[in-house]
Amino acid sequence: MKKHEVRVHSSGENLQRTDQLAWKIAEVAADPVAVTDDVVEMVINRVIDNAAVAAASVQRGPAIAARAQAQAHPSSPGATVFGVSDRVSPEWAAWANGVAVRELDFHDTFLAAEYSHPGDNIPPILAVAQHVHSTGADVVRGIATGYEIQIDLVKAISLHEHKIDHVAHLGPSAAAGIGTLLGLTTETIFQAVGQALHTTTATRQSRKGEISTWKAYAPAFAGKMAVESVDRAMRGQTSPTPIYEGEDGVIAWLLGGKDARYEVSLPERGEAKRAILDSYTKEHSAEYQAQAWIDLARKLGLEHPELRTADGAANVTRIVIHTSHHTHFVIGSGANDPQKYDPTASRETLDHSIPYIFAVALQDGEWHHERSYAPTRAARPDTVALWQKVTTTEDPEWTRRYHSSDPAEKAFGGRVEITLAEGSTIIDSIAVADAHPLGARPFAREQYIAKFRELADGVLESAEINRFLSLAQQLPKLGADDVSQLNFIAKPGLLTRGPKGLF
């Protein structure tokens, strides 16, 4: 990996194009380096994972509305949309499928200086591949690039510190991945990356306070903009330059300002793109920083059955979760969002509330993508009573481990102290989720397939489940015709056309 210093330059400095971060990203995307076998296997896992969570969400409001919008834009050859047989324009397929993938907050993650769901790169890359008749090997290469660029940016540049939403790293990564897929020149990818970044910077209010359905749309919008940016760049249209380093650019006015310095490490020419191996998926449908806490809550409930009795809440005086800065301030009580303690809060808000998640997982011994968020579940009096007793606090050591570059030390958990009414205290800790590569039960192909089968049950016919899994596992060997079928169709009569809007 090669480190690149990125800072603001005045217009008078005339920063050369080849010295700009967007150009360096484009060079990585244009490098035809082979994809290693372990990366190929993980790409397949993540394609299955994305489809699994999409199957579970195709009947939910945001996915229904996004699908209806896409269906209003038919195209030939076009790209497929999860759940239906329609073929639509690729940017709209990226939109609809991106929403379906993100809606339940249930696919892969990478956390460092910034947050990310790098699986969000897959819908726009696959949509373009289907539209232009790319092979499965091309798709694998494109996805490897998308993951590489997003994860490298996430390691180096914090967006949330400046209240910019994390999808600002997704626009450039998806554009780069599409550039690799299509074998575009460095110049064309450079222009697409700049346009994609320029059009996908937005504030973090979409993940603050009362979180709305837009949370699922934000990454889909970034993917859609990436497709459109590539299209414009292929037509010779140019982008704001320097997009990162300009005196009126992203760093100067949206991030650290004119004196900021960032070091972004990117693969050197001929170096394999392996960043996907640093990411991790979710066993539970909740914000990633809640994954380990769900596992710990389940464990504590088994070890201390008195916490699960009808009067379990009365047995507890308080629960304090000692954790990282990010967890405390984003999904914990440090966010100072009263909505995180509101029984009538939206599902999107509850999946960003560690006090709610810990209380329910402790009581139920499980976490389910529907049951755990049901309004009747959130309003249960004993749950509300326990929930209000849960707070978080930042622990500097867990913050340090959160940001560690050592994979063996990096952690997303913390320590919990449960003070009981009779005076004793239960103390336990967890570093990573059970499904994490270093966790108690790491995910492998078997678990990805099981996740797909579980979430697709009742949504797809068994033959359709088997067909998709067979096709996905042959991804690097697929011809263009097979890539065009890398989709699933819901059971007949299950889905209805979405609400009417403008289209």
Image: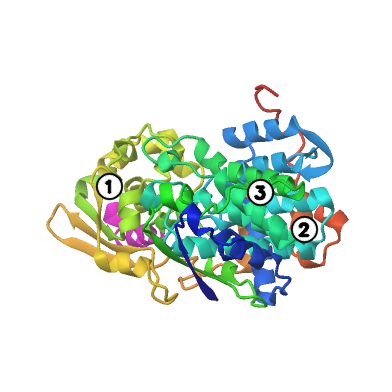
The percent position of residue 378, horizontal first and vertical second, equals 38, 38
| Residue 311 seen anywhere in this rendered image of the structure | no
Q: Where, quadrant-wise, is the C terminus in this rendering?
A: top right
Say whether disc 3 or disc 2 marks the residue closer to the N-terminus: 2
What colour scheme has been applied to the protein in the rendered image?
rainbow
Instruction: Please tell me which residue is depicted at 54% across the width and 42% down the height of the picture.
Output: 218
The percent position of residue 217, horizontal first and vertical second, equals 56, 39
Mark 1 touches mark 3? (CB < 8 Å): no
**Closest to the observer, 192 or 122:** 192
- Determine the secondary structure under disc 3: helix
Q: Where, quadrant-wise, is the N terminus in this rendering?
A: bottom right
Instruction: From this view, report whether residue 329 is shown above or below residue 407.
Output: above
Q: Which residue is mark 1?
A: 333
**Mark 3 and mark 2: Cα distance apart in space:** 31 Å
Instruction: Please tell me which residue is depicted at 71% across the width and 35% down the height of the picture.
Output: 70
Q: Which residue is mark 3?
A: 456
Instruction: From this view, report whether residue 43 is shown above or below residue 220.
Output: below
Say whether disc 2 or disc 1 marks the residue closer to the N-terminus: 2
Which amino acid type corresponds to the residue marked 3 in the rendered image?
A: Ala
Q: Which residue is mark 2?
A: 182
| Chief secondary structure of the magenta portion | helix
Task: Give the extent of the magenta segment.
Answer: 295-308
